[in-house]
Image: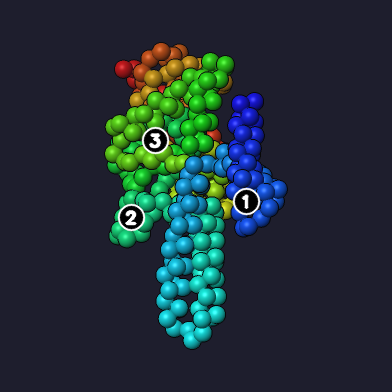
Amino acid sequence: MGLIIFRLTILVLISTAGYFYPPFILSRQAGALTGFVLGLLIILLETRVRRAQFRIIWTASIGTLLGVLVGWLLGSIYHTVVQTLEMATFIRIFFLIAFPYIGFLLGIKKPEWLEPGYFVNFFRSKGEDHIYKLLDTSVIIDGRIAEVCDTGFIDGALVVPQFILKELQLVADSPDPLKRQRGRRGLEVLDRLQKTSKVRVVISELDFPEIKDVDSKLIECAKSLKAKIITNDFNLNKIAKLQGIEVLNINELANALKPVVLPGETMRVFILKEGKEKDQGVAYLDDGTMVVVDNARRMIGQTVDITVTSVLQTTVGKMIFGRYNGELH
């Protein structure tokens, strides 16, 4: 209600100014009408500005000012070249209209081009600061990215868009205790990355309001920044690759780093529970790989040496089959 009163006050003031000080040598009534129309245009502009992000307003303003400057310079140069005054005037007006328009559109459609960091990086030699990797919500909550970064295998900058932070916040505020715990874990992982990680973490304001789906926003963000996406999400992995975006999957990395086990090798495991078949025991390696051991059902709760008989690669991971050697440790 207060905003409506304020807008009406603005309309009345501008209309009154037009009545007592009519522009363009108009009558008082025409001046008041002109002021009223201008007031409506100002209010319309104000409503559009309120909906836009500050980053877009800023870059659009910078783009327009740069366009005016370039248009004025080019108009001045061509003014000394052409022969007639009419042609010189037309060229000046053309440049002063065309270039601010182009700058305004660049500020809206490509705001990252007008950010100070873009100009700094443009004149800087290509280095690791140009290597961007976008973090997905799933990989932040997973937490293993922190350990990977601590090893120094990840270079460049990790970029976390604001819409990913908002999604994490929604999960952390969820009434479901499991979701709430996952969300808080993700926020803790981000805090750890910012404080102790060997890579730089950047919080990006880049957003795409017309896109509602977070995964689609992340893909557009990757295209805009020419970045890679780090994720554990199977669907996002497939969609991003279909659109030509390079994806780093932590699960695939973990599977690649699992030790190679060959039939005939001996390994030591802790028999945790009984298996599905007769006399089978089940153990797990540190990386979560299941080990099914024949003749080990009676050894539940104990550490034994086994001989690997076969290795099976499944869609969910690797399974190792072995035989109990009869030695207890």
- Inspect the image, locate mark 3, and give the three-letter code of the amino acid beneath it: Ile
**Residue 65 appears anywhere in the view:** yes
- Inspect the image, locate mark 1, and give the three-letter code of the amino acid beneath it: Pro
**Residue 311 appears anywhere in the view:** no
Q: Is residue 308 above or below residue 242?
A: above
- Front position among marks 2 and 1: 1
For label 1, the residue is: 22
Q: Is residue 265 above or below residue 44?
A: above
**How many angstroms separate mark 2 from mark 3 (CA)?**
29 Å
- In the picture, measured across the screen, residue 84 lies left or right of residue 35, that is left
- Quarter occupied by the C terminus: top left
For label 2, the residue is: 120
**How many angstroms separate mark 2 from mark 1 (CA)?**
48 Å
At mark 2, the secondary structure is helix
Q: Is residue 327 above or below residue 193?
A: above
Q: Are marks 2 and 1 in contact (CB under 8 Å)?
A: no
Residue 145: mark: 3
**How many angstroms separate mark 1 from mark 3 (CA)?**
66 Å
